[in-house]
Amino acid sequence: NAGVTQTPKFQVLKTGQSMTLQCAQDMNHNSMYWYRQDPGMGLRLIYYSASEGTTDKGEVPNGYNVSRLNKREFSLRLESAAPSQTSVYFCAFVGRGTDTQYFGPGTRLTVL
Amino acid sequence: QKEVEQNSGPLSVPEGAIASLNCTYSDRGSQSFFWYRQYSGKSPELIMSIYSNGDKEDGRFTAQLNKASQYVSLLIRDSQPSDSATYLCAVTSSGGYNKLIFGAGTRLAVHP
């Protein structure tokens, strides 16, 4: 998946639990993104980071926080998981010298 | 709300036929347009990008863009069973930072 790793691959949480989804890219790209994908829907942008140390909200940021402490890693945190956050989460980055986004393998999250 | 619309399908075509996938978008400021293919349980992978009006061909794939009509299409010639997947149309948001707006995808089924 184009030099992007996501952990974990699968996770089951109970309502109210917290967790952090990790994304790391090994190609020194600036822009990184977090999306969620629900059945029958396209990918929706949660948060993005244009560069190290900067983050901004996307279309559906409520219930999430992000952290971009270095250029390589962009993490997504659920402070108090809700069943509505059951989804597949994809991390993406923009390729060097392009405007094309490339996606990680995804994390499938279920909140009971 | 800026939107990208696609027919959800399934679009069923026989092997060897031409598959035609369509997409309309609402953001007149969009400058870049992408088609991603997504197999079940996998992450989206880039098929084509197109930036100017007209056709762009890459192997069996042809992307077509008409900015005046806010319309993007993807033609797949000589369709193969391995082309069976969901095809996602994505356009860049006029808000910058290479943010993408995705359609919900069209499911393509190519039958032998």
Image (cartoon, helix red, strand yellow):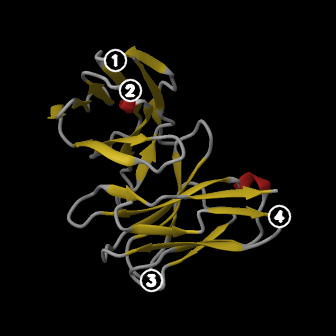
- Alpha carbons under labels 4 and 3: distance apart: 31 Å
Disc 1 or 2, which lies upstream in sequence? 1
Q: Residue at x 28, y 46 (%)?
A: B32
Q: Which residue is mark 4?
A: A14
Mark 1–mark 2 Cα distance, whole angstroms, equals: 7 Å
Residue displayed at 30% across by 15% down = B17
Q: Are marks 2 and 3 on the same chain?
A: no
Instruction: Give the residue drawn at x 75%, y 73%.
Output: A18
Callout 3–callout 1 Cβ contact below 8 Å: no
Q: Tag 1, which secondary structure?
A: loop
Residue drawn 37% across the image and 31% down it: B83
Q: Nearer the viewer, mark 2 or mark 3?
A: 2
Residue B84 vertical position relative to residue A95 in the rendered view, above or below? above
Residue for badge 1: B15
**Percent of width and height locating residue A2:** 34, 62
Name the front one of labels 1 and 4.
1
| Closer to the camera in the image, B33 or B93 | B33
In this picture, residue A25 sits left or right of residue A96 = right
Mark 4 surroundings within 10 Å by alpha-carbon count, few (fewer than 14), some (14 through 19), many (20 or more):
few
Q: Which amino acid, mark 3? A: Gly
Tell me if label 1 and label 4 are in contact, CB under 8 Å.
no
The residues tagged by marks 1 and 4 sit, at their Cα atoms, a distance apart of 45 Å
Please state which amino acid type lies under the numbered disc 2: Pro
How far, Cα to Cα, is label 3 from label 1?
Answer: 49 Å
Q: Which residue is mark 2?
A: B81
- Marks 2/3: CA distance? 45 Å
Q: Amino acid at mark 4?
A: Lys
Tally the numbered discs. Answer: 4
Q: In the structure shown, which secondary structural element does the residue marked by tag 3 occupy?
A: loop
Q: Which residue is mark 3?
A: A53
